[in-house]
Image: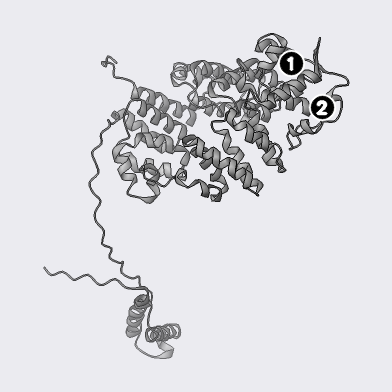
Amino acid sequence: MTTTPPRPAQSPESRMPPPALKAEWSKTVQALLIGTARGGGDPADLLADCAALGVAAFGAALPQEIAAEPLPPAPPETAGLPRPAARAVLEAIMSLDDEVLLTEWCALAKANTVVADHRMLPSLLALGTARPGLRAAVVEVLGTRGRWLAGTRQGWSWASGTAPLVDEVPLAEILDLPSAQRVRALRRKRRSDPEAVNAFIAAEFEASRRSADRQVLVSALETDLGPADEALLEAALDDRAAAVHDEALRLLRKLPASALAARAADRLGRGLQRVEDGFEVKAGELWSAQPDADEQRDLMRDGSEKGVAGRIRAAAASVAPSYWTARLETDDRGAAKVLRKGPWAGALLRGVADQLAAATDPRPWAVAAAETLTGMEQLEMLAALPASVAEQAVVAVSVNWHYDLLDHACAQLPAPWSPETTRALLHRYAALPDPRWRSGRPPAVLLARGNADLLGANWEGLTRRWPENSLELEVLRLRIRLRESFAPPADDPA
């Protein structure tokens, strides 16, 4: 059997029809338009010319031959693979396209020292490429073969361990990155090499003429913020740009023993006096007159801290709740009870809401602040809290919330919730009337993020309260299967 030798690859110039061929094709097209009945000629010959010349003019070129070495064999997988039940759950999660469930699967797989089956690796790599927020979870279950596979395609290089990360951009070039990447790049570098980054930030802040660059430099200090950053932040309070000043002030308020906190404590001591009904402004003191230059320096320039109420709020936002417990000689619950009273309760509690993360017990403060904050301000207050504290605060604050506000707040809590939080929020949801558009359907965030074991134990009550057999219940079924698929076998002593 003879084989035809491969045709040489065509260059772009050889694919273009020559002038004579173009002229012949034009004549053939004209003959087709006129027709042989009017223009003469043989119809069979005209069709043959049309076929030959049309293919020559518009036919696709042969693909170029590329000499490439085949990929080396994939290395053997050194980690264990999950049981068939866990593999089936992962396939179901991928078909459902649920990021929370996928993150939970990856966390359980990592805890059980297993990696994803090789058939799922391309799908996981593609998902991590499309959604960068999932990469940290996905990369933990790729294993040796997954990292090898990631090295075969440029778009998957983030998982191969050899991708050029933003961290590798030289410090001197970070301010030339797109605006969305500069702060993240500086914060990552500050975490790995704080001394070099701190020196860079200090030098660039002094030399930068653009306020946007100075704001980026100040924002980068939020990572591993500490007393050593206070000097630069204090200097930034004198910046002419309002955005730079406000960013520095926001970070300074997170330093409990800063000079700003001392100045605020002095103003609160001079400006407020304890009365039977909370606190009152002292007559003839600093808050009975216009703010001086020093106080103006410690106020936000965005317009949120104007007037006496705004100035009181600024001072309260600059001290930790321990200032109030020490001044009133009581605990957090007792201090919050006092600050809830009086004409300036709203201003004081709005300031304290910014300091909840520093409270020994944030729950009474959160409940007190919720009485004066709007719904969006309450959500912002809860978002600033550590996860474990936020769970307690949501349970404490949401007693009188409507459905939508509770749903938004619960969506901010990282999954999975503790059993105690799940039980409390389950009862809270069950006591609320469903919105008309969700009548009979269970809350999605509860079933997707609550403790799966507790929700499974309450399955009968869930289906009785929310009888609609909806996608949310399927998610809960899948979460229960997920927990069971990684549970040790019954005959396993572990």
Q: Is residue 406 above or below residue 458?
A: below
Q: In this view, does 375 lie above or below 322?
A: below
User: Of 464 and 456, which appears nearest the observer?
Assistant: 456
In the picture, the quarter occupied by the N terminus is bottom left
**Observer able to see residue 203:** yes
Q: Which residue is drawn at 65% across and 49% down?
A: 210
Q: Residue 339 carries which label?
A: 1
Badge 2 density bin: few <14, some 14–19, many ≥20, Cα 10 Å: some
Badge 1 density bin: few <14, some 14–19, many ≥20, Cα 10 Å: many
Image coords of residue 426 (percent x, y): 54, 19
Secondary structure under the numbered disc 2 in the rendered image = helix
Image coords of residue 166 (percent x, y): 47, 45
The single residue placed furthest to the right in the displayed view is: 284
What amino acid is at disc 2?
Val
Q: Which mark is residue 308?
A: 2
Q: Which mark is residue 427?
A: none
| Apparent side of residue 300 relative to residue 182 in the rendered image (left or right) | right
What amino acid is at disc 1?
Leu
Q: In this view, does 133 lie above or below 412?
A: below
Secondary structure under the numbered disc 1 in the rendered image = helix
Q: Which residue is drawn at 52% across and 23% down?
A: 467
Q: Residue at x 77, y 18 (%)?
A: 269
